Image: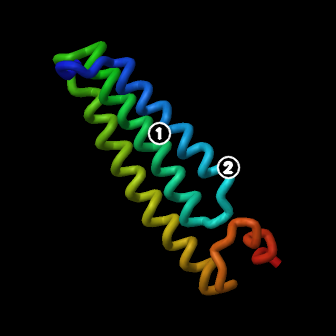
Amino acid sequence: MIEGIGVFDVLAVSTIIFFVGLFGFVTRKNMISLLISIELMLNSVALNFVVFNKFLYPGNIQGYIFTLFLIAVAAAEVALAIAIIISFYRMDNSIDADEMDSLSG
């Protein structure tokens, strides 16, 4: 791995990032906060791809390729989610996730 930084140190940081995102997703009601929490979890997974690739297969680049695809999917997900959030805001002037049930009728 990197000089002075072990695999378990990076995995510990990745785990903390993932659970901060999970906690934010469970506790927040604002749709933008939910989106940020999902992005934190996706970035944690991308970090895991890179770390496991570097540790298990140092000469190969598959983990980096998966990480690039994950970043591309996350960017597309953000663009779509922001469009949906803007649409909900125009309908109800609120982006509270609890109020989205009342918009269907």
Q: Which mark is residue 65?
A: none
The extreme top residue here reads: 56
As helix, strand or loop, the secondary structure at mark 1 comes to: helix
Q: Nearer the viewer, residue 104 or 17?
A: 17
Q: Quadrant of residue 12?
A: top left
Residue type indicated by callout 2: Val
Sequence order check, earlier mark of 2 and 1: 1
Q: Is residue 33 above or below residue 45?
A: below
The percent coordinates of residue 91 (x first, y second) are 66, 85
Q: Nearer the viewer, residue 4 or 94?
A: 4
Point 49% across, 31% down: residue: 15
The percent coordinates of residue 52 (x first, y second) are 34, 21
The percent coordinates of residue 58 (x first, y second) are 20, 17
The extreme front residue here reads: 4
Q: Please tell me how crowded label 2 is: few (under 14), some (14-19), or many (20+) other residues with Cα within 10 Å.
A: few
Q: Is residue 77 above or below residue 103?
A: above
CB within 8 Å, label 2 to label 1: no
| Quadrant containing the N terminus in the rendered view | top left
Question: In the image, 94: left or right of 79?
Answer: right
As helix, strand or loop, the secondary structure at mark 2 comes to: helix
Q: Is residue 100 above or below residue 11?
A: below
Q: Report the number of discs.
A: 2
> Could you give the CA–CA distance between mark 2 and mark 1, rounded to whole angstroms?
14 Å
Residue highlighted by disc 1: 17
Point 58% across, 58% down: residue: 34
Q: Please tell me how crowded label 1 is: few (under 14), some (14-19), or many (20+) other residues with Cα within 10 Å.
A: many
The percent coordinates of residue 32 (x first, y second) are 54, 66
Q: Which mark is residue 26?
A: 2
Point 69% across, 84% down: residue: 92
Q: Nearer the viewer, residue 14 or 58?
A: 14
Residue type indicated by callout 1: Ile
